[in-house]
Image (cartoon, rainbow, N blue to C red):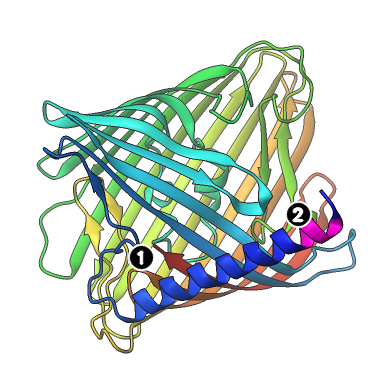
Amino acid sequence: MSDTQGDWQMRNGRIAAIALGLSIVWQSLSAESVTPSWLLPPIKEANGRITAQLGGRLHLDFVRFDNDNRGAGNAGGIQVRRGWVNLVGKIYDFDYRVSVDLADNQVSYKSFYLRRRIGPGRLILGQFKPFFSLDDTISSDNIMLLERAFVATTVAPLFRLGAAYQGRFHQLTYGLTAYSLNDIDGVRSNGSGQAARFTWSPPSAENRLLHLGLSLAKERYSRSNATEQGRAASLTVRPVGAKGDDSRLNLLLFRNGAPTDVIKSALELGTVYGPWSLQGEYANARYDDGIQRAVVTTYYTQLSYALTGESRPYNRNVGRFDGIGPRNKRSGAWDLVWRYDHIDGRQRTLGDLPLSHRAVDAYTLGLTWTYSANLRLMLNFIHSRSRDRLTHSTLDNTNALATRVQLIF
């Protein structure tokens, strides 16, 4: 392809993206429902046994970093954090969902599953996120800050191929998952895992809530001759978000090629009292390959206040928070959010010889404007500090100012 042809296609692609964005914004400004509406009408077979609905999400981030003098420094700019295209519907007695992320000029499969109600719950087959952690269960369209807590980005399993059964019994919810450590995009790590999540939320008055949860998981990385980080048992954290590559920190890495057993657990707490909301988790992950051991501990506290008086909604069927619906359809909803996040990783030999001990603390202050279920604007300030506890030194100290335009269609 010539440069002229490439420029022409790129220019037309940008025009199409701008046109789509303007159409979404126009629809958002006229939306009355708190449920995201769709730009395209659903497709239905004559008797309604087969349906299809096309939609998606666009999370466009603008990030500016205040780097310290260590390393090359993070490069700010614009990033398409998520560019999902979703196809949802049903085929006879099955629901289905196909979600593809086109962000960063790559094609990555997210959800790709069939789901059917069996007994009191639902059976899920395909690729999805195993049930684990409160913050990871909340949709990225409804999280209160731009980035999830470290519990969700490091300890919770990613999108995986497997089978799950999820349901509700009175005030209890449960989610049981058996999964591979691989996904549709390719072989990342050979192995398998099992996870279980249980939540409890007693009856409460209007705009009041108590949520308690417990997540457990066991994973086994199979023996492999591969030594690259992508296939070995490893854990990496980005303290200032997805675009902060220079601040990325490796907390542990097993390269012996031996099978590695991992035990994970997480405790959840969530409360709502009128416009106030409190969310927190404590998680632990233990790695052991018979030669080395590692322990990862992470926890966070997140406090939010709805400046316009809304209460954070809760889905009792799944045990998670949903998106806030503005009281005033003209001015929208405003939320102020603060979070403290900590993660600590230690790796040592079986003879108790320390190999590494690193920790990260991150503070985030955020302001969110939700105009409708289709349009949301977010502003976050993040301060992070990474330390090497073996050498008692600071590895990174970075601030980030990030904004997001979120469009749902």
Give the image location of residue 271, x and y in percent: 28, 62
Residue 368 position by quadrant: bottom left
Which comes sooner in the sequence, label 2 or label 1?
Answer: 2
In the displayed structure, 370 sits above or below 50; it is below
- Residue visible at 61% across and 49% down in the picture: 343
- 33 or 172: nearer the eye? 33
- 363 or 248: nearer the eye? 248
Residue identifier under label 2: 245
Where is the C terminus found, in terms of image quarters? bottom left
Which region is colored magenta?
3-7
In the displayed structure, 116 sits above or below 102; it is above
View extreme (bottom): residue: 331
Residue identifier under label 1: 278
C-alpha separation, residue under disc 2 versus residue under disc 1: 30 Å
Can residue 272 be seen from the camera position used here?
Answer: yes
Residue 214 position by quadrant: top left
Give the label on residue 100, or none: none
In the displayed structure, 156 sits above or below 40; it is above
Of the residues shown, which amino acid type is indicated by label 1? Leu
